[in-house]
Amino acid sequence: MVNDERIQELLTRGVAEVIYDDALRTKLTTGKPLRIKFGVDPTSPNIHLGRATALLKLRDFQNLGHQIVFIIGDFTGVIGDTSDKESERPMLSRETVEQNLTTYFEQAGKILDMSKVEEHRNTEWLEKLQYREICDHADTFSLSDFIARDNIKRRLDAGKRISLRELLYPLMQGYDSVAVRADVEIGGTDQKFNMLAGRKLQERAGMVPQNIITLEILEGLDGRKMSSSWGNTINLNDTPADMFGKVMSLQDQLMMDYFKFATRIPIVRVEEIQAELNAGANPRDIKMLLGEEIVKMFYGEDRAKHARAQFVATFQDRALPDDIEEVTAKEGESFADILVRSKTVASKTEWRRLVGEGAVKELDDEGAETKIEDPAILFSADITLKVGKRRFIKIKKD
């Protein structure tokens, strides 16, 4: 038998809705292992903290002895999910999806014990379906089921195009639940329709329909939903310094949601932190605690403390970090090429934007800053740059 208190936290912490709550609680009290499904489309190379909230919930289930079924949507990722989109989502190429998913299982392993996880790609079953089978699945739903969704209705009212391809996505995610015989599916509130499709298809296949847990959406650094396309993410592969620095840039009003959804600090302690804030505690100090906790979860306590100390030294004491990346370059090479090559910036477009915003600065040995104002500047002598708020790089002659 499982402790009622653990079940209560499992089904409430960061949870928006449980379908159906009483039935799932009954299953959980028996101690019988359940198959817990989670799928993620590799639309970018990184798993970010918004998706990690689901991974933390999976770890909670894993700690109670349940079987985690982790699905990479290498087929659905090509098609594209429209659940949270206000316009038609373009199809990705198979090559892009393959490149993106390279380290997904590895990244998930920062939270889950992957030696106990059942791993799948949904090409395993979706690519084998015949047209007759797809028609049979489609017969489960009506067009009105699809167009009643809020974001679809808004697009129709605005006269925006909706492709028939978008109607197929819920069928595919739903069939994943049939293929892996899921007992429970976890996903964000924006995935509710797709997860309910899984219940319907399981019923049609003669299975006991899965329970569903929808999770609250973790907002990104700018207050919008965390999304790689918006660049407002904290990624699991970020360095400890970047991860800590991003947390410190978080809007104050989002801190408590991050404590609840993106850490496993005991809820009692989270309530104490909220009380400290209400009593006038400095939000910066609370944010430092949050940053250290998040970095510790992925990199351990020592590196988390180092990231905090480095942040204080760099941004409060105005000292240079002690582990600035060094690269070599030839005289006359453009800074844009050097920084793209070193992955300090993602593209020449980003370089030009940052220079235009006055966000690229030359640093002297004392940390004094001089703005770089010409995006076409060429490398001529050893230099240390600060790029944006948290990126530093030393460029030396080859």
Image (cartoon, rainbow, N blue to C red):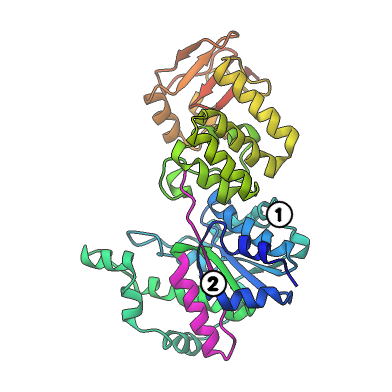
Checking the image for residue 212, the label placed there is 2
Q: What secondary structure is found at the residue carrying circle 2?
A: strand
**155 and 77: which one is in front?**
155
**In x, y percent, where is residue 156?**
25, 68
Checking the image for residue 190, the label placed there is none
**What crowding class fits label 2: few (fewer than 14 Cα within 10 Å), some (14-19), or many (20 or more)?**
many
Please give the residue where the numbered disc 1 appears in the rendered image. Answer: 109
Report the Cα–Cα distance between label 1 and label 2: 23 Å
Q: Quadrant of residue 122?
A: bottom right
Which amino acid type corresponds to the residue marked 2 in the rendered image? Ile
Q: Quarter of the image for the N terminus: give it.
A: bottom right
Q: What secondary structure is found at the residue carrying circle 1?
A: loop
Cβ–Cβ below 8 Å for labels 1 and 2?
Answer: no
Query: In the displayed structure, would residue 82 be above or below residue 145?
Result: above
**In x, y percent, where is residue 244?**
59, 34
Residue span colored magenta? 191-220
Query: In the displayed structure, would residue 226 be above or below residue 354?
Result: below
Which amino acid type corresponds to the residue marked 1 in the rendered image? Gly
Q: Quadrant of residue 159?
A: bottom left
Query: In the displayed structure, would residue 272 be above or below residue 371?
Result: below
Q: Residue at x 54, y 35 (%)?
A: 276
**216 and 311: which one is in front?**
216
Could you tell whether 117 is left or right of 358 in the image? right
Could you tell whether 97 is left or right of 357 in the image? right
Q: Residue at x 73, y 77 (%)?
A: 32
Q: Residue at x 53, y 32 (%)?
A: 248
